Amino acid sequence: MSKIIETQDAPKPVGPYSQAVQVGPFLYCSGQIAIDPKSNEVRLGPVQDQAELVMKNIEAVLTKAGYGFEHVVKTTIFLKRMSDFSVVNEIYGRYFKKNPPARSTVEVSGLPKGVDVEVEITAHKG
């Protein structure tokens, strides 16, 4: 049985999907982009600012579901430019201080709303 996770502390979905779905001990989170959850406006600007907001949005979804970054087992980072890797990696690393999850990072030709970075995660608690 699955449970839909929704919080006003993270952006509303921009399409027909949920912020996250919990299935047993697993939490599958949709990709987060740099949308301010209070205004629901995209925050374009330096990639480091976008990455910080993305990680805060992920944190809000994890918290709502009763999880934390220590429960994340897999992430995928989507970058508009692989040249932003080191900047995004540094910010991402602040959230995974111990036992970081498995990860893939891919460069894509475009992301929703014209942002430069998107991150999706899977977490496990049990």
Image (spheres, helix red, strand yellow):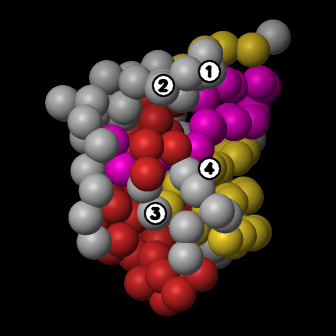
Q: Residue at image x 51%, y 44%?
A: 112
Give the residue type that dot 4 points to: Glu
- The residues bearing labels 1 and 3 have C-alpha atoms spaced at a distance of 21 Å
Q: Earlier in the sequence, mark 1 or mark 3?
A: 1
How would you rate the neighbour count of disc 3 (Cα within 10 Å): few for under 14, some for 14-19, many for 20 or more?
Answer: many
How would you rate the neighbour count of disc 1 (Cα within 10 Å): few for under 14, some for 14-19, many for 20 or more?
Answer: few
Give the residue type that dot 1 points to: Tyr
**Residue 34 seen in the figure:** yes
Per the rendered image, the range of residues in magenta is 20-35
Q: Earlier in the sequence, mark 2 or mark 3?
A: 2
Secondary element type, mark 1: loop
**Residue 98 seen in the figure:** no
Asked if the residue at tag 4 contacts the one at tag 3, i.e. Cβ–Cβ closer than 8 Å, the answer is no
Q: Residue at image x 58%, y 44%?
A: 31
Residue 101 or residue 108, whichever sits in front = 108
Asked if the residue at tag 2 contacts the one at tag 1, i.e. Cβ–Cβ closer than 8 Å, the answer is yes
Considering every residue shown, the one lying at the far left of the view is: 39
Disc 3 target residue: 116
Q: Quadrant of the N terminus?
A: top right
Q: Earlier in the sequence, mark 2 or mark 4?
A: 2
Give the residue type that dot 2 points to: Pro
Disc 1 target residue: 17
Secondary element type, mark 3: loop
Disc 4 target residue: 120
Of the residues tagged 1 and 3, which is closer to the observer? 3
Of the residues tagged 2 and 3, which is closer to the observer? 3
Give the residue type that dot 3 points to: Asp
